Image (tube, coloured by chain):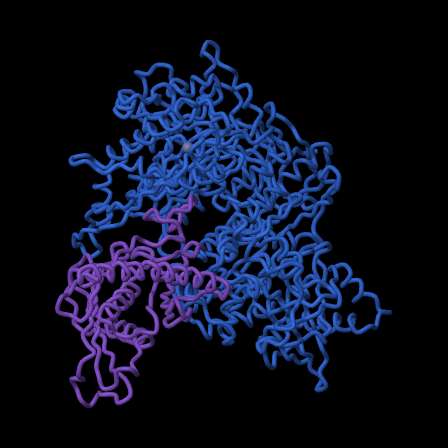
Chain colours: A purple, B blue
């Protein structure tokens, strides 16, 4: 299968180093402490953050830091075949864990001992790269909730098909069976907090793909910062400052 | 700019789902014309000042690809929508268009109209997909017209009337292919056009000038629905049609490996099917089986018989034609085989063919257009009718022709001229024909493939030495023995005396998989090529030269990586233990067979290397003896060797290849290594090992041998390979050449050995009949055979050194890889033989010769002789060709004799005769080698 034409265009018309269109919106769930909608092309996810609040289950309470919990779900209508999937299947549990660990690494949990932060992410529409979209949405929602963080985590995926590194795989590219690297970074600190890869790559290729994913994460970070800044300006305006 | 494309799709489960895909439209897609002032012209492909820019629609590209490939057609804009449609409809045409677009000598530019913001069109309601795509093509043409604003003419080429009308309405110039080509006033280009089927009426004029008298020659093909239901009910059988290479009037349908084969006799029953077509076949009633057979044989006598090389085995031997026509005893044993007729063609395997036009005179008053008959070099292909306007020019040329159609009123299919290769008889032309015919890829390796090579110059690194999987065997006295001038040295040997009196014998094979990793472009390319091809004056490598001649080649005095099989053997050549390891070796000598033999023979030499050689030779003799005891056949083939003039590349001398003890010694250890490796990999991977088997010949295949043997009073026991080997051994006569001759005849009754995946067959079928080995594989030539590369990976995995690539888990992929290897191998062999035949012809061109020959087969009008000195075989006619009655000669079937009516003269099989070899030209530009009695 030809995923990159000799003219250098991917099936959807992007070039190998291009991301899909991204769009973010803050404060989409009024009840939550913080929330955000994040779109990468046709992948659309929503994240809502509750807390910091009292720990519900006392036995889980941590005396030196906050408890971060995450629940990842996919809406039944998010894929083409509207199938009813059991809640808490293996894939969801794994992704919940990945998101929780990634977010935990940037939340300054030691500032909020004996409290609990809940992150809910739901995929509304899936077209590849859901993990990255979830992390970006969660990051924005946490920022919206005003939870202290070391840096904004941003995530992006990159893959390797037809001997070409490709940024931000969509569903067709993702299902091609090539390598798929999902990366999460702390852009200001220049640290990697998440790195997942299925399939194998030679070291040199991997470095190229990884570099591309880092570029992608940075681009997401720039965009997220713009959105936050714009949001803050709006708030200031509304408060009449 | 973003556009969402949505469409409904049926999933595999049968559910209908709506699929939404993103579709980005861009500003940065350029027009590809260097004259453009707006676009980035760095990627521009069109000429600096094109007078006309051509845009083809999908059907034109699909049908007229041969025209597009002609250099006269240039400055073409290929739209991405056209490419996409072509790809969906015909992958091979797609690949050819792509090759044109990437060819730097041609000016084909791909314009991604589907992603350009101004040329993308959305489907209108009620518009069919085809109409939408036609509109997209017109929109793109219009865009070009306004974008280049008159600096070039944009011409849309379409044969679709509606599309052309709309285009002209919209202000785009449009023409049909025919009218465009006519406007170029290049009559030769008109030859390239595919003839629409309706023109068949004209074609018929050659056969019968009165169109009203056209008769139906073939039965109608059944409609697809009927075929499907027939297949379902079991009255039709589906399979690939394979035409007998030596008798084009006989074909087989059946799965290549399993089940009964159905024989199709004669062109009428083949009903327009070509070799390689997937067909539906209906069985004939049993009482017709015999009848059909004799019919086919009657046809056969019309065919030309040429002098050719002696076949190596039955796969390329005409064993069915070996039976003289009308011999009752033979047909009876055959008639038990089901025969059938083709009722429909499920998938065509038409491609282009090499050959030449049948000699003919230019017809008068035909306006320069001639209807000619094209005869392919490949005898399995029927003659093809073509129109040509350049008959004079083509008669003495080798040309390529493509097939377009075959209706049931025409005896022959019709096609069109594609290109000229060169002068008939010219060495380069004929070599190219050989390569094209055998589908051999001679293109240079692509840059992606070359990018996989290690940095050069390469040498063994300290990491290689430190690697725990690799044993350092540099201190061992390793040497190689190969044909003189061999540069791609796959194998090296070693024989060390151990203190306990035993020997440590090592076979060290180039560690190719250390450089060729699976799933790389290099690996894909090698897997496709399958094998290196050896022609008389040229070698076409499977791997790029730096690997074959340097990095992998186990040359003398340099350190190289190897994969070693090491045995401890008693002086009686009993294997005590076997181990396998990756290693580093340093060969101390690269000997030729002659040198190695000379060393062993020279009793004054007592140096360690010579001693090793003698020890190995002693072991090899015992191993060989034991193998023969087990029933391995020592078959003889007639390998020919040329001495080639380095200046002109013409053959100077020709002779049989001499087999020395040294050759046999190396062969013996290679066989042993292959067997040891086969055992090891099969033990670890019983379902996915690549092995090589040699099927037991059926009695029917041995029939010609038995008949010949019986005629000379020899009784051969063919009940097992052991029995056959023994009776071949006892076949001696006063005549010293007799035994060899019988062995040569036996060899050609054997089928060829084939590769297979162990998961596809059961262990008894793994047998290698010729070697009398229950298991066999290829391990020892990874530089020039891809099978060995696979086996190296299997062996490494069985040792736990490397993980087995994922592909080994896919049974169907493995089977298709084995099929491809068998195909490539056979083609490589056919090509080498054809190359030898070509050089034989060139050799005799200036040297008419008288020599000794043996009669190997009696025919109704003469006999076939084998010429031992030159390894060739050909017909000798006693009566002039075409004289069907045989005149004053008659054949004694039982005794395999041909006698003169008056009893004054007779010739019998295996008799020695003296013949005269000379190149004659019975028809202009058709040189052939003729054999006549002296
Ligand atoms: Zn332009």
Estimate the x, y position of residue A25 in percent, counting from the top left. Answer: 22, 59
In the depicted structure, whether residue B161 falls above or below residue B714: above
Q: Quadrant of the C terminus of chain A?
A: bottom left
Residue at x 66% of width, y 81% of height: B570
Q: Which residue is the extreme one toward the left?
A: A31
Q: Nearer the viewer, residue B413 or B743?
A: B413
Q: Which residue is the extreme one toward the top?
A: B365
In the depicted structure, whether residue B297 falls above or below residue A150: above
Q: Nearer the viewer, residue B701 or B577?
A: B577
Regarding residue B37, the answer to whether it shows in the image is yes
Q: Nearer the viewer, residue A10 or A1?
A: A10
Residue at x 58% of width, y 78% of height: B468
Q: For the image shown, how many numbered marks are present on the structure?
A: 0
User: In the figure, is residue B204 to the left or right of B776?
Assistant: left
In the depicted structure, whether residue B420 falls above or below residue B629: above
Estimate the x, y position of residue B387 in percent, counting from the top left. Answer: 44, 22
* Quadrant in the picture for residue A172: bottom left
* Quadrant in the picture for residue B38: top left
Estimate the x, y position of residue A80 in percent, counting from the top left. Answer: 19, 56
Q: Nearer the viewer, residue B788 or B306?
A: B788
User: In the figure, is residue B490 to the left or right of A15?
Assistant: right
Quadrant of the picture in which ligand 1 is shown: top left
User: In the figure, is residue B673 to the left or right of B255?
Assistant: right
Estimate the x, y position of residue B15 in percent, counting from the top left. Answer: 16, 54
Regarding residue B706, the answer to whether it shows in the image is no
In the depicted structure, whether residue B595 falls above or below residue B108: below
Q: Which residue is the extreme one toward the right?
A: B604
């Amino acid at each position: 299968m030809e995923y990159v034409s000799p003219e250098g265009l991917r099936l959807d018309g992007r070039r190998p180093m291009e991301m899909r269109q991204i769009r973010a919106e803050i404060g989409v769930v009024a009840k939550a402490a913080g929330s955000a909608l994040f779109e990468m092309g046709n992948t659309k996810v929503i994240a809502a953050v509750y807390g910091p609040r009292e720990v519900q289950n006392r036995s889980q309470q941590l005396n030196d830091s906050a408890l971060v919990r995450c629940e990842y779900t996919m809406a039944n209508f998010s894929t083409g075949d509207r199938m009813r999937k059991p809640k808490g299947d293996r894939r969801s549990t794994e992704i919940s864990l990945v998101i929780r660990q990634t977010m935990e690494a940037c939340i300054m949990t030691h500032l909020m001992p004996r409290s609990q932060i809940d992150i809910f992410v739901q995929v509304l529409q899936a077209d590849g790269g859901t993990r990255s979209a979830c992390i970006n949405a969660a990051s924005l929602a946490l920022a919206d909730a005003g939870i202290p963080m070391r840096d904004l985590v941003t995530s992006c995926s990159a893959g390797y098909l037809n001997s070409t590194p490709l940024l931000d795989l969509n569903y067709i590219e993702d299902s091609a069976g090539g390598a798929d690297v999902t990366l999460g970074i702390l852009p200001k600190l220049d640290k990697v907090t998440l790195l997942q890869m299925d399939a194998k790559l030679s070291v040199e290729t991997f470095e190229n793909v990884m570099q591309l994913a880092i570029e992608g994460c940075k681009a997401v970070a720039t965009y997220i910062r713009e959105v936050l800044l714009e949001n803050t300006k709006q708030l200031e305006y509304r408060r009449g400052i | 700019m973003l556009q969402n494309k949505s469409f409904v799709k049926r999933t595999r489960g049968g559910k209908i789902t709506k699929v939404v895909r993103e579709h980005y439209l861009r500003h940065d897609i350029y027009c590809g014309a260097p004259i453009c002032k707006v676009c980035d012209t760095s990627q521009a492909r069109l000429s600096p000042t094109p007078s006309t820019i051509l845009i083809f629609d999908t059907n034109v590209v699909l049908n007229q690809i041969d025209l597009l490939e002609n250099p006269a057609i240039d400055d073409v804009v290929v739209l991405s929508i056209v490419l996409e449609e072509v790809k969906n409809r015909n992958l091979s045409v797609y690949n050819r268009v792509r090759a044109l677009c990437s060819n730097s000598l041609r000016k084909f530019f791909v314009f991604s109209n589907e992603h350009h913001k101004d040329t993308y069109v959305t489907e209108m309601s009620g518009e069919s997909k085809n109409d939408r795509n036609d509109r997209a093509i017109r929109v793109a043409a219009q865009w070009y017209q306004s974008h280049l604003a008159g600096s070039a003419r944009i011409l849309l080429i379409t044969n679709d009337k509606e599309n052309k009308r709309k285009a002209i309405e919209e202000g785009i110039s449009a023409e049909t292919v025919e009218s465009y080509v006519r406007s170029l006033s290049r009559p030769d280009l008109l030859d390239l056009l595919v003839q629409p089927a309706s023109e068949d009426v004209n074609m018929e004029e050659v056969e019968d000038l009165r169109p009203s008298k056209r008769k139906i020659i073939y039965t109608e093909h059944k409609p697809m629905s009927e075929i499907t239901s027939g297949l379902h009910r079991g009255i039709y059988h589906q399979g690939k049609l394979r035409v007998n290479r030596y008798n084009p009037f006989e074909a087989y349908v059946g799965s290549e490996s399993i089940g009964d084969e159905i024989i199709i006799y004669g062109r009428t029953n083949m009903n327009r099917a070509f070799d390689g077509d997937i067909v539906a076949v209906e069985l004939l009633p049993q009482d017709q089986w015999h009848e059909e057979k004799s019919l086919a044989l009657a046809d056969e006598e019309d065919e030309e018989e040429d002098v050719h090389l002696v076949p190596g085995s039955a796969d390329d031997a005409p064993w069915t034609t070996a039976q003289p026509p009308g011999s009752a005893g033979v047909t009876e044993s055959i008639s038990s085989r089901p025969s059938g007729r083709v009722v429909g063609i499920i998938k065509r395997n038409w491609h282009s063919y090499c050959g030449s036009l049948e000699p003919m005179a230019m017809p008068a008053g035909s306006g320069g257009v001639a209807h000619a008959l094209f005869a392919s070099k490949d005898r399995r292909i029927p003659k093809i009718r073509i129109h040509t306007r350049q008959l004079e020019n083509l008669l003495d040329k080798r040309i390529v022709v493509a097939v377009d159609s075959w209706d049931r009123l025409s005896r022959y299919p019709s096609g069109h001229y594609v290109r000229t290769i060169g002068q008939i008889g010219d060495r380069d032309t004929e070599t190219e024909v050989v390569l094209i015919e055998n589908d051999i890829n001679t293109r240079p390796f692509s840059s992606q493939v070359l990018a996989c090579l290690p940095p050069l110059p390469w040498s063994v690194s300290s990491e290689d030495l430190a690697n725990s999987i690799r044993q350092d065997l540099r201190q061992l006295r390793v040497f190689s023995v190969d044909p003189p001038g061999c540069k791609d040295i796959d194998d090296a040997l070693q024989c060390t005396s151990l203190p306990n009196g035993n020997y440590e014998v090592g076979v060290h094979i180039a560690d190719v998989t250390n450089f060729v990793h699976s799933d790389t472009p290099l690996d894909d390319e090698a897997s496709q090529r399958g094998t290196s091809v050896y022609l008389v004056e040229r070698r076409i490598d499977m791997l790029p030269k730096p690997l074959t001649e340097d990095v992998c080649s186990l040359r003398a005095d340099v350190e190289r990586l190897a994969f070693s099989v090491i045995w401890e053997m008693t002086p009686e050549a009993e294997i005590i233990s076997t181990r396998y390891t990756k290693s580093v070796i340093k060969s101390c000598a690269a000997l030729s067979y002659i040198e190695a033999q000379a060393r062993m023979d020279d009793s004054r030499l007592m140096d360690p290397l010579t001693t090793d050689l003698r020890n190995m030779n002693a072991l090899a003799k015992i191993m060989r003896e034991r193998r023969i005891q087990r029933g391995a056949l020592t078959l003889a083939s007639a390998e020919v060797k040329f001495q080639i003039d380095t200046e002109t590349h013409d053959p100077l001398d020709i002779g049989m290849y001499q087999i020395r003890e040294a050759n046999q010694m190396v062969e013996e250890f290679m066989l042993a290594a292959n067997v040891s490796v086969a055992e090891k990999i099969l033990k670890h991977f019983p379902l996915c090992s690549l092995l090589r088997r040699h099927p037991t010949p059926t009695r029917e295949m041995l029939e010609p041998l038995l008949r010949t043997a019986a005629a000379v009073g020899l009784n051969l026991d063919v009940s097992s390979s052991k029995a056959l080997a023994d009776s071949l051994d006892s076949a001696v006569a006063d005549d010293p050449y007799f035994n060899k001759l019988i062995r040569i005849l036996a060899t050609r009754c054997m089928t060829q050995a084939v590769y297979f995946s162990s998961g596809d067959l059961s262990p008894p079928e793994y047998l290698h009949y010729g070697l009398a080995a229950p298991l066999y594989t290829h391990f020892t030539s990874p530089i020039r055979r891809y099978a060995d590369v696979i086996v190296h990976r299997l062996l490494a995995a069985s040792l736990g050194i490397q993980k087995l690539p994922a592909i080994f888990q896919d049974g169907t992929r493995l089977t298709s890889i084995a099929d491809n290897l068998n195909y490539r191998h056979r083609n490589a062999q056919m090509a080498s033989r054809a190359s030898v035949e070509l050089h034989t012809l060139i050799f005799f061109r200036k040297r008419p010769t008288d020599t000794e020959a043996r009669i190997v087969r009696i025919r109704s009008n003469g006999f076939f002789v084998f010429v031992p000195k030159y390894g060739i075989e050909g017909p000798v006619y006693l009566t002039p060709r075409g004289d069907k009655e045989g005149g004053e000669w008659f054949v004694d079937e039982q005794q395999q004799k041909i006698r003169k009516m008056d009893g004054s003269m007779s010739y019998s099989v295996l008799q020695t005769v003296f013949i005269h070899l000379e190149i004659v030209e019975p028809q202009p530009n058709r040189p052939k080698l003729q054999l006549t009695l002296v």
